[in-house]
Image (tube, helix red, strand yellow):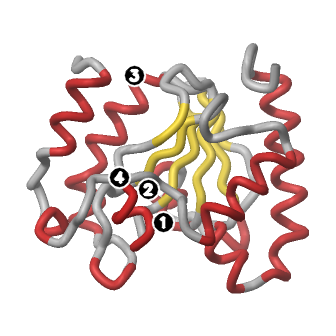
Amino acid sequence: MLTWDELISACDNCKKCQLHKTRTNVVFGVGSCSSEVLFVGEGPGESEDLKGEPFVGRAGVLLDDMLKIIGLDRTKNIYIANIVKCRPPGNRDPQSDERELCLGWLRAQYRLISPKIVVCLGRIAAAELIDRNFKITRDHGKWYDKDGVKFMALYHPAALLRDPYKRPDTFVDLKSLERVIKETCERTLQ
């Protein structure tokens, strides 16, 4: 198994798919490597590609506000990563071959972090990590157990910016997440 630094270095040099040709930066992840809670989005957008950090644009500001509601902070008690580490051109959805080729990086992060809870941000992350037939409008906020790790999905913050009427449901989902963190994690909300 690679160390954290070795994993970052290997990912920074990845050329497995065509996305490496148009990236400015690899967007590996951000947060506490010893976190009990892992958030996973689909892939970086333009702001993330420029900065090399996930969720830093308008959706990132909203995500930070959502995290604060339940006592979470991207720099202290969670880790945030993406399914793909390079920006798809035009902010399109990552294609299935790109997701498959990049998923190994997320799996390695997952093994090193060893989270107790995984929160998928949006339908693409949820379809990759929870169930291929996942429907975000139907299944957001539901809990799934996979080998003793709890999984759930929230609406992607970008979707909440486009459709503010989804925010009340997301608040309910966040409060459920807060409750499960309190029940499951030893140090996350301390």
Which residue in the structure is indicated by mark 3?
112
Q: Is residue 45 left or right of residue 39?
A: left
Which-is-in-front pick, marks 1 and 4? Answer: 4
- Kindly check if marks 3 and 2 are in contact, taking CB atoms under 8 A apart as contact: no
Q: Please state the horizontal and vertical placement of residue 53, each as a whole percent of the image.
A: 43, 52
14 lies above or below 114 = below
Real-space Cα separation, disc 1 to disc 2, in angstroms:
6 Å
Residue at disc 1, secondary structure: helix
Point 62% across, 74% down: residue: 158
Q: Residues within 10 Å of mark 3 (few under 14, many from 20)?
A: some
Real-space Cα separation, disc 4 to disc 2, in angstroms:
18 Å
**Placement of the C terminus among the 4 image quadrants:** top right
Labelled disc at residue 128: 2
Which-is-in-front pick, marks 4 and 3? Answer: 4
Point 19% across, 44% down: residue: 12
Which residue in the structure is indicated by mark 1?
124
- Kindly check if marks 1 and 2 are in contact, taking CB atoms under 8 A apart as contact: yes
**Placement of the N terminus among the 4 image quadrants:** top left
Nearest the viewer among 96 and 86 is 86
Q: Given the image, on which type of amino acid does mark 3 rest? A: Leu
- Kindly check if marks 4 and 3 are in contact, taking CB atoms under 8 A apart as contact: no
Q: Is residue 124 left or right of residue 106?
A: right
Q: Given the image, on which type of amino acid does mark 4 rest? A: Val
Nearest the viewer among 117 and 27 is 27
Which residue in the structure is indicated by mark 4?
27
- Earlier-in-chain disc, 1 versus 4: 4
113 lies above or below 145 = above
Residue at disc 2, secondary structure: helix
**In this figure, what is the number of numbered marks?**
4
Point 27% across, 18% down: residue: 3
- Earlier-in-chain disc, 4 versus 3: 4
